[in-house]
C-alpha cells in the first residue's frame, strides 16, 4: 500500500505534464480541426461555429504548399539522418578505439555546441551565412570562390549543417556510452581471432550498439520532422525559404498569418499522425530485422 | 526639479490606477476617448491637429509596425483578445480579410451620404463588399513612373508612354550602360504585379455571383507575366527584392533609371534619399492601349468590432479623410505624398507638399489626372497577405532562374484555394 502511494506520488509529475502539455493540446487541436467559425457565401455575414467534418483535412491535403513542405522535410530527413547517425557513430568509434588523442577534450568540444540553444545556434550560423556579414564568405571571395549559402539549392544543406553542428556531439555521447558497455572479453576474443581495429569497429562493435543506433535514429527523425527554428531564422535573410517551408512553418503561417485556426489544427494533427506512423514503421522494420 | 515625497506617492498611486481604467469610456464630463493604431507616417501630427481642433473627442494614438512587419498580426491578436483599438489602419488588399474575420465592423450606416459625396467612388468601391462598407479609404494611389530626369535628358531618352516603348528603352539602357538598368522587377512585389495586371484588365477576384471567383492567371495576367518574363530573360531589368539593401544601392548609386510605384512613393523617396533632390520627376505609368492604370498602395480606416464609441470613431475618420487640415498636417511632416481620396483636398495637398525635390513639378496635378484613370472593377481577395507571400516565393525563384512568373501566379492560386475552402467560403476557380 505504502509502495503504491510512493509510486503514485513519484509518477504524478510525469502524468500531470503528459496531460497538460500533450493530451490537452492534442485534444484541443483535434477538436479545432473539426469545427470552424463559418459564414455562408462571401463570408461577410455573422459567424457561427459549425461542425465541418473533414473539410479542413481535405483543404490541407489538397494544398500544394503543404505537400511541398512535407516533401522538403522528407528530403531533409534523407540527407540529415544518415549523416548524423554515421557521423556520430564514426566519432564515437574513434574515441572508443583510442585513436583520438586528448579524448576528454575532443568529447567536450564536440558536445559543447549542443549546449547552445537552437535559436542562438541558428543566429550564429545566420551571421556566418549572410553575404556582406560573413567572414567565411569574405574568405572564399578572396580565393575567388563565389559561394552563396542561402541560394536556391544550398539552403537545405545549410540547414542540415546547423542541425549537425548542434546535435552531433550529443548523439556521439550516447554511442560512446553504449560502446563502453560492450563486454571487453568479446573484443579481446576478436583480437585473438585476428580482427584489426577497423574490422573490429565495423563487425563487432557496431552490431553490438544497434539498440543505441535505432534509438538515436528515431529521436533524430522525430526531431527533424518538426523542423522550424532554423528555417524561420534563416528566412529573414533569404527569399528561398518561404513562409510555408516546412510543415511546422505551414502550421504557424496558417494560424498567425492566415488566421485560419481550423486549417492550422488539421495540419498539426496530420503532422502528428505522420510522425507517429513513420516512427512506428521504422521501429517495426528494425525489430523485424532483429528477429 | 525637486519632487516632494507627497507628489511621488501620489504619482505612484495614480499611475497603476490610470493603467487599470479602461479608455474608450466617457469620463465624467470629459471628452470621449478613442484609440487609434496606424503605421502611416505623419499620423501623430494628424492626431495632434485633430485633438486640438475640438474638445469632445480625444484620440490616443499608437504607432504600430507596418502590416507585413507584424502590424496585421498585432491587430488580429488584439481582436481575438477583445481589445482591438477603436480605429485601425488597413491597406486595401487586406480589407476583405479583416471584414471576413469580423475585425472590421460593418459601418454602412455610419458612413453618411455627406461623407460619401466627398470621396472618390472608385476608392469606396474597393472597401465595399456585399453592399456593405467595411472601411473608409484615406488615399488612393495610382501607379506612376518615377524617372531620373538628369539621366533621361543627358541621353535624350523620351518618356515611354506605352509598354512597348518601355521595353525598347530597357534594351537601349542595357546596351548603353553595362551597370545600369531601366527598372527593377521586384521579386517581393506581388502588389506591383497586381497593379500591372489590374491595369491590363485582369480580375483576380470577382464576387458578383455571390461566390469568390478566383482566377489569378487570367488572360490579361498572362500577358503581363509574359511581358516581364521577357524583360527578365533578356536581362534588361534588375530582379531582386525592392525592400532590400541591394535595391537601396541600385537607386542610391544611380544604377536604376525608373521606379514603378504608387504616388505615395514620391514622399518615401524624398525621405530616403535627400541627396538625389532635383534628379527625379514623375510621369504617367506606361499603358497597353487604353489609358487606364491600377493602384499600388493606399490605406483605409476601419472601426473594429471592439470599439465602444463607433460614432466618435467615425467622426475622427471623417475628419482624417476629408478635412484639409488633416492632409496638411500629414504632408507638412515631410514624409508623405499620399494622394487623398477626397478630391476636395487635392488643392490643399498640392500646396502643402514641399515641391523642390521634384524640381517644382506639380505632382498633385499629375496624380489627379492619373487617379481619374484608375480601371474600374478590381476586387481584392479574402487572404491577400498569404496569396501575396506565395506569389513572391515564386517570383524569388523565378528571379533566381528557376520557374517563371506565370508559374508563381498559378502557385499563388493553388496555395490560396485551400485556405478559402477551409474558411467555409463559397468559391469557384476560373481559368488558370
Image: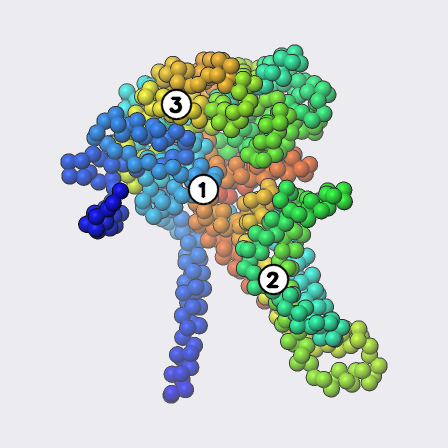
**Residue B20 point in image, percent of width and height:** 25, 49
Q: Secondary structure at mark 2?
A: helix
Chain to which mark 1 belongs = B
**What is the spatial separation of the Cα atoms under label 3 and label 1, in whole angstroms?**
27 Å
Looking at the picture, do discs 3 and 2 lie on one chain? no
Let me know if residue B59 appears in the view: yes
Q: Is residue B295 visible?
A: no
Q: Which residue is mark 3?
A: B332
| Residue situated in front as seen by the camera: B239 or B292 | B239
Residue to which mark 2 is pinned: A113
Instruction: Give the residue drawn at x 53%, y 39%.
Output: B389
**What's the colour scheme?**
rainbow
Q: Nearer the viewer, residue A59 or A74?
A: A74
Give A28 or A224, whichever is nearer the viewer. Answer: A224
Among the two numbered marks 3 and 1 on one chain, the one whose residue lies closer to the N terminus? 1
Secondary element under disc 3, as helix, strand or loop, is: helix
Q: Is residue A242 left or right of residue A92?
A: left
Q: Is residue A33 left or right of residue B80?
A: right
Taking A279 as reference, is B209 left or right?
Answer: left
Q: Quadrant of residue A105?
A: bottom right
Q: Determine contact: label 1, label 2, CB under 8 Å.
A: no
Up/down of B400 relative to B15, above or below:
above
| Residue underneath mark 1 | B70
Residue farthest toward the right in the current orientation of the protein = A194
Work out whether A83 lies above or below B392.
below
Q: Residue at x 52, y 59 (%)?
A: A272
Amino acid at each position: 500500500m505504502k509502495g503504491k502511494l510512493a509510486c503514485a506520488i513519484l509518477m504524478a509529475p510525469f502524468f500531470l505534464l503528459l496531460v497538460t502539455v500533450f493530451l490537452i493540446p492534442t485534444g484541443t487541436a483535434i477538436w479545432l480541426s473539426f469545427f470552424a467559425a463559418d459564414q455562408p457565401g462571401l463570408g461577410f455575414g455573422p459567424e457561427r461555429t459549425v461542425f465541418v467534418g473533414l473539410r479542413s483535412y481535405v483543404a490541407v491535403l489538397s494544398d500544394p504548399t503543404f505537400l511541398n513542405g512535407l516533401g522538403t522535410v522528407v528530403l531533409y530527413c534523407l540527407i540529415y539522418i544518415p549523416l548524423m547517425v554515421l557521423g556520430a557513430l564514426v566519432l564515437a568509434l574513434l574515441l572508443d578505439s583510442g585513436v583520438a588523442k586528448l579524448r576528454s577534450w575532443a568529447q567536450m568540444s564536440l558536445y559543447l555546441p549542443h549546449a547552445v540553444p537552437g535559436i542562438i545556434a541558428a543566429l550564429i550560423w545566420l551571421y556566418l551565412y549572410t553575404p556582406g556579414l560573413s567572414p567565411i564568405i569574405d574568405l572564399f571571395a578572396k580565393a575567388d570562390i563565389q559561394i552563396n549559402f542561402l541560394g536556391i539549392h544550398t539552403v537545405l544543406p545549410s540547414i542540415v549543417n546547423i542541425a549537425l553542428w548542434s546535435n552531433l556531439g550529443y548523439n556521439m555521447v550516447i554511442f560512446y556510452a553504449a560502446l563502453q558497455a560492450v563486454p571487453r572479453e568479446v573484443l579481446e576474443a576478436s583480437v585473438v581471432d585476428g580482427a584489426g581495429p577497423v574490422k573490429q569497429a565495423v563487425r563487432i562493435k557496431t552490431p553490438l550498439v544497434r539498440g543505441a543506433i535505432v534509438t538515436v535514429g528515431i529521436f533524430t527523425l522525430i526531431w527533424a520532422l518538426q523542423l522550424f527554428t532554423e528555417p524561420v531564422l534563416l528566412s529573414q535573410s533569404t527569399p528561398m525559404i518561404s513562409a510555408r517551408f516546412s510543415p511546422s512553418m505551414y502550421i504557424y503561417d496558417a494560424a498567425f498569418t492566415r488566421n485560419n485556426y481550423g486549417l492550422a489544427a488539421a495540419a498539426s494533427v496530420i503532422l502528428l499522425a505522420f510522425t507517429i506512423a513513420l516512427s512506428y514503421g521504422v521501429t517495426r522494420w528494425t525489430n523485424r530485422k532483429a528477429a | 526639479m525637486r519632487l516632494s515625497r507627497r507628489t511621488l506617492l501620489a504619482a505612484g498611486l495614480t499611475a497603476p490606477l490610470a493603467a487599470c481604467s479602461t479608455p474608450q469610456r466617457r469620463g465624467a464630463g470629459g471628452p470621449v476617448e478613442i484609440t487609434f493604431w496606424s503605421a502611416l507616417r505623419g499620423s501623430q501630427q494628424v492626431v495632434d491637429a485633430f485633438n486640438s481642433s475640438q474638445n469632445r473627442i480625444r484620440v490616443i494614438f499608437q504607432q504600430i509596425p507596418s502590416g507585413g512587419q507584424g502590424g496585421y498580426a498585432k491587430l488580429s491578436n488584439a481582436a481575438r483578445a477583445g481589445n482591438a483599438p477603436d480605429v485601425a489602419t488597413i491597406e486595401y488588399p487586406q480589407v476583405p480579410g479583416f471584414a471576413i474575420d469580423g475585425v472590421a465592423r460593418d459601418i454602412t450606416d455610419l458612413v453618411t451620404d455627406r461623407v460619401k459625396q466627398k470621396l472618390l467612388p472608385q476608392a469606396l468601391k474597393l472597401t465595399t463588399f456585399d453592399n456593405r462598407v467595411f472601411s473608409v479609404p484615406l488615399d488612393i494611389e495610382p501607379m506612376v513612373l518615377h524617372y531620373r530626369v538628369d539621366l533621361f535628358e543627358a541621353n535624350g531618352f523620351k518618356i515611354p508612354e506605352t509598354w512597348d516603348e518601355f521595353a525598347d528603352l530597357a534594351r537601349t539602357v542595357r546596351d548603353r550602360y553595362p551597370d545600369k538598368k531601366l527598372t527593377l522587377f521586384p521579386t517581393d512585389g506581388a502588389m506591383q504585379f497586381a497593379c500591372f495586371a489590374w491595369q491590363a484588365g485582369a480580375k483576380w477576384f470577382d464576387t458578383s455571383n455571390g461566390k469568390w471567383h478566383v482566377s489569378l492567371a487570367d488572360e490579361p495576367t498572362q500577358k503581363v507575366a509574359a511581358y516581364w518574363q521577357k524583360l527578365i530573360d533578356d536581362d534588361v531589368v534588375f530582379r531582386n527584392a525592392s525592400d532590400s539593401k541591394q535595391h537601396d544601392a541600385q537607386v542610391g548609386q544611380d544604377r536604376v533609371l525608373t521606379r514603378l510605384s504608387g504616388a505615395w512613393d514620391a514622399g518615401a523617396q524624398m525621405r530616403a534619399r535627400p541627396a538625389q533632390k532635383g534628379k527625379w520627376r514623375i510621369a504617367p505609368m506606361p499603358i497597353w492601349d487604353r489609358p487606364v492604370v491600377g493602384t499600388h498602395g493606399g490605406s483605409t480606416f476601419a472601426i473594429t468590432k471592439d470599439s465602444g464609441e463607433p460614432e466618435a470613431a467615425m467622426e475622427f475618420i471623417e475628419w482624417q479623410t476629408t478635412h484639409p487640415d488633416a492632409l496638411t498636417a500629414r504632408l507638412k511632416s515631410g514624409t508623405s505624398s499620399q494622394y487623398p481620396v477626397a478630391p476636395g483636398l487635392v488643392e490643399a495637398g498640392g500646396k502643402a507638399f514641399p515641391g523642390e525635390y521634384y524640381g517644382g513639378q506639380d505632382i498633385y496635378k499629375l496624380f489627379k489626372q492619373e487617379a481619374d484613370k484608375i480601371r474600374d472593377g478590381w476586387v481584392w481577395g479574402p487572404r491577400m497577405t498569404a496569396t501575396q507571400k506565395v506569389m513572391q516565393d515564386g517570383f524569388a525563384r523565378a528571379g533566381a532562374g528557376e520557374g517563371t512568373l506565370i508559374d508563381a501566379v498559378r502557385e499563388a492560386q493553388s496555395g490560396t484555394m485551400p485556405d478559402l475552402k477551409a474558411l467555409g467560403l463559397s468559391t469557384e476557380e476560373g481559368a488558370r
